Image: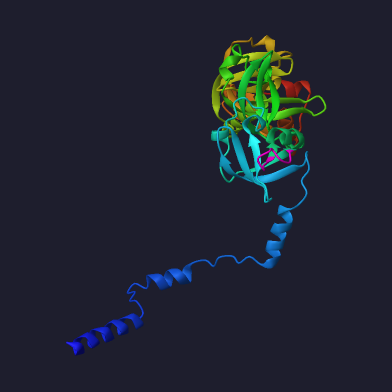
Amino acid sequence: METEIKNNITEVEEAAEKPAENPAGEGTAAASNAPAEPVETMADYDKELEASFRKINEGDILSGTVIHVSEEEVTLDLNYYAPGVIKAADMSKDPSFSLVNDVHVGDKIEATVIKRDDGAGNILLSCAEAKEVLGWDKLNTYLEEKAILPVKVSEVVNKGVVGYLEGIRGFIPASHLALSYVEDLSTFVGQTLDVRVITVEKEKKKLVLSARDVLKEREAEKMNQKIAMMAPGTVLEGKVESLMPYGAFVDLGGGLSGLVHISQISQKRIKNPSEVLKEGDTVKVKVLNTNNNKISLSMKAVEENSEPEPIEEKVAAQYSSGKSVGTSLGDLLKGLKL
């Protein structure tokens, strides 16, 4: 019995000395592939220590990382011995702003120091005040760069609506809301519009925005794409929309219109387009070219069923052929059948 017990003890000791089996090699592979954790040096520690005891004054603008969000306040890590706190009322002047929906843990926020100690060991901050200081510089940059920016309409005011950009109240005139006249401005409340900054006056706290400018540019881009797809020689039907001394503008549909120069209206010589055309007439035209995103048309080419040949080219062809161009009575009577 004693011998059996000794043998069992020996087996247990030998098993304990052997390394644990790992057929798949999972532990070894995981350990070898795991990224090495960064090791803080004494220099890093000194920097953090120095930053945590730096002097902070009221009015300073600090940058911090959000570590907690509630309906009442936001808490920031300022890399300082005391955390920063921003009350809900000091986050934004935008009435549609929501702490819970618009602020998230990990966000970077800049805020102005209101109090160095709020009585609970926190630094009291205001994001709205910081935006007032920093926001105007950003708005001037947006103006210079003609940046397109999203703005949510918060309310209707006299002759326009209001939206906030960089925490600053901006005015969008009714005439700059859409491409056409807007009768009911309230339909825009709650909508997010793409706008451009068109006026920035920090001293007067004046910020004017335009959605129409963005819409016009996008509409022009669409028209240019349509024009680029029109092949010279294509015959189209359209309506005369206006007459000018130099030609007629023809509505081709789809927001496109082109010019028929007076020289391309008729086979016979005319002094004014009104001699053969009136507004509202339906006409067939041929696309001559689309240079510079302008559609050049010809009615004469449709009548001839061929490309129009400028008079100058005809004359040049006669001279280059070596044939003389006579003006005598005999020359004029040539070809007449009596």
One can see residue 178 in this view: no
Q: Is residue 201 left or right of residue 12?
A: right
The vertical placement of 160 against 291, above or below, is above
Task: Verify whether residue 121 appears in magenta.
Answer: yes
Residue at point 73%, 33% (across, down): 129
One can see residue 82 in this view: yes
Question: Which of these two is toward me, 113 or 184?
Answer: 113
Task: Verify whether residue 326 appears in magenta.
Answer: no
Question: Which of these two is toward me, 184 or 179?
Answer: 184
Q: Is residue 322 left or right of residue 260?
A: right
Prevalent SS, magenta region: loop
Asked where in the image residue 138 lies, by quadrant, the reply is: top right
For the C terminus, give its image quadrant.
top right
**Numbered range of the magenta stretch:** 115-123
Q: Residue furthest left?
A: 1
Residue at point 68%, 62% (across, down): 45
Q: Residue furthest bottom?
A: 3
Q: Position of residue 154 (x, y in %)?
A: 61, 22
Q: Residue furthest front?
A: 2
For the N terminus, give its image quadrant.
bottom left
| Color style of the picture | rainbow
